[in-house]
């Protein structure tokens, strides 16, 4: 039977840490659905559509990675896609508490759902989308933190919103 795993997240934006987890996941599962959360409560830097397209571009040569968005309960999305494995990334102890709660809540909502935790390469363990956004908005270099194309799009975003402090006059 085909093993399909779902990797849900905000991916605002996708970082090298996320990419590393997807690549590792592909060594274990037949296919991965990257599920971009559409959360009306958050104000993301990139729209859901922009995030989906960015990830689609990165994995355009890999038929085993499908990218889509979802809203509402993850367990409903999983049922709809006939998947019962959730992949989540663990960077440090600080991730653990929230992830542990989420995994057990999903199991409570649907006992057939199994959460699979993966650790990225050590060099990506300090990367978070939020920090990347902050560094980028202050004009810091994103090399090694996000894929090249994402870096380009972040620069565009900040230029457009006039947020890139490196361009501010003293
Ligand atoms: P969420 O808002 O659901 O936490 P994120 O896009 O921040 O969405 O993260 C999605 C998943 O990827 C989470 O399980 C998170 O712990 C994991 N993750 C985020 N950054 C990294 C990273 N640098 N390395 C490994 N996993 C990561």
Image (cartoon, helix red, strand yellow):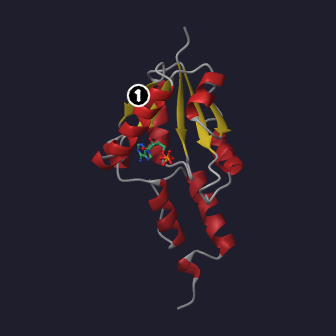
Residue situated furthest top in the rendering: 1
Quadrant for ligand 1? top left
Of residues 120 and 110, the one nearer the viewer is 110
Give residue 96's position: percent from left, percent from top: 33, 42
Give above or below for 13 relative to 131.
above
Residue at 54% from the left image edge and 8% from the top image edge: 1
Give residue 149's position: percent from left, percent from top: 61, 52
10 Å neighbourhood of mark 1: few (<14), some, or many (≥20)?
A: some
Question: Which residue, given by chain and number where applicable, does mark 1 sit on?
Answer: 116
Of residues 43 and 46, the one nearer the viewer is 43
SS at mark 1 in the image: strand
Give residue 56's position: percent from left, percent from top: 66, 39
Of residues 158 and 92, the one nearer the viewer is 92
Residue situated furthest front in the rendering: 108
Residue 153 in which image quadrant: bottom right
Of residues 92 and 105, the one nearer the viewer is 105
Whether residue 58 is visible to the viewer of this picture, yes or no, is no
Give above or below for 5 relative to 130.
above
Residue 28 in which image quadrant: top left
Numbered circles on residues, count: 1
Whether residue 36 is visible to the viewer of this picture, yes or no, is yes
Give residue 127's position: percent from left, percent from top: 41, 53
Give above or below for 154 relative to 119.
below
Residue situated furthest bottom in the rendering: 170
Residue at 42% from the left image edge and 33% from the top image edge: 103
Residue at 69% from the left image edge and 50% from the top image edge: 50
Disc 1 residue: CB within 8 Å of ligand 1:
no
């Amino acid at each position: 039977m085909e093993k399909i795993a779902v990797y849900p997240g905000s991916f605002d934006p996708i970082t090298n840490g996320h990419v590393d987890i997807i690549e590792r996941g592909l060594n274990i599962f037949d296919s991965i659905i990257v599920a971009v959360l559409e959360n009306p409560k958050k104000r993301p830097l990139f729209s859901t559509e922009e995030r989906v397209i960015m990830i689609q571009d990165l994995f355009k040569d890999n038929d085993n990675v499908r990218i889509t968005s979802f809203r509402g309960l993850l367990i409903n999305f999983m049922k709809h896609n006939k998947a019962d494995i959730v992949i989540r990334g663990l960077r440090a102890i600080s991730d653990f508490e929230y992830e542990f709660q989420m995994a057990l809540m999903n199991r409570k909502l649907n006992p057939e759902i199994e959460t699979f935790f993966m650790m990225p390469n050590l060099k990506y363990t300090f990367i978070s989308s939020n920090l990347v956004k902050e560094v980028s908005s202050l004009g810091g270099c994103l090399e090694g933190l996000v894929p090249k194309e994402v870096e380009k799009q972040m620069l565009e975003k900040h230029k457009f919103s006039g947020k890139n402090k490196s361009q501010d006059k003293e």
